[in-house]
Image (tube, grey):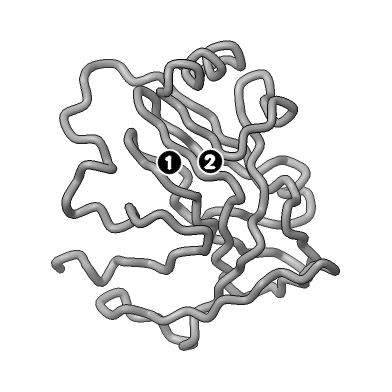
Amino acid sequence: MILSDKKILEAIEKGEIVIEPFDRNCLGTNSYDVHLGKWLALYVDEVLDARKHNKIEYLEIPEEGYVLQPGKLYLGVTEEYTETFGAVPFLEGKSSVGRLGIDIHATAGKGDVGFCNTWTLEISCTQPVRVYRGMPIGQLIYFAVEGDIERLYNKKKDAKYNTRTDKPVESMMWKNKF
């Protein structure tokens, strides 16, 4: 079951959902709009290795925007910091963003209950497109959880993305044992 706008507001009042900064105008019928933060990141090496820590370089999106190029993976970040307890957050691109040929996540649209951070975006595009910090980029949809949670994400010792940040975070796949 997807939470409605009223249920999202109730969850915020109870502290089950935290959105900082929160703007009531960004609350839709059953979602909350999130915005592109000021940082993008690109991997340094052309060939990435799943067993190694792949380094990234950050770039700040200038006031005049930044032109994304096809064939590149950009890591972006939401302006909004979120916490979610008692619901599963899903991040989806806004249709207006999709109609510009921008994908905001390759595979990681679902968050875990207990995830407390900004959202790293895996951005790609089909043709060159200029993006701006603060532009609406996606929407969070919350699904109700049935049953008790044994381990919240923010309490897991092996959680790889718990450090609060305002910048995109590179893949931590290399921390897995395989």
Q: Badge 1: how crowded within 10 Å, few (<14), some, or many (20+)?
A: some
Look at the numbered disc 1 and give the secondary structure of its residue: loop
Q: Is residue 130 above or below residue 22?
A: below
Give left or right: position of 151 versus 2. left
User: What is the quadrant of residue 174 in the picture?
Assistant: bottom left
Work out whether 71 lies above or below 17.
Answer: below
Residue 97, above or below 66: above
* Alpha carbon distance from label 1 to label 2: 6 Å
Quarter holding the C terminus is bottom left
Count how many numbered circles sit on residues in the image: 2
**Mark drawn on residue 24:** none
Q: Are marks 1 and 2 in contact (CB under 8 Å)?
A: yes
- Mark 2 residue type: Leu
Q: Amino acid at mark 1?
A: Lys
**Residue in front for this viewpoint, 174 or 101:** 174
The quarter of the image holding the N terminus is top left
Q: Is residue 61 left or right of residue 77?
A: right
Q: Foreground residue, 22 or 91?
A: 22
User: Residue drawn at (64%, 57%), measured in percent from left and top?
Assistant: 37
Residue depicted at 61% across the width and 66% down the height = 39
Residue 110, which numbered label?
1
Q: Position of residue 144 (x, y in %)?
A: 40, 19
x, y percentage for residue 80?
Answer: 57, 45
8 sits to left or right of 115: right
Pointer 2: what residue? 91
Where on the picture, by quarter, is residue 30? top right
Question: In the image, what residue occupies the spot 69% across and 73% down?
Answer: 70
Q: Earlier in the sequence, mark 1 or mark 2?
A: 2
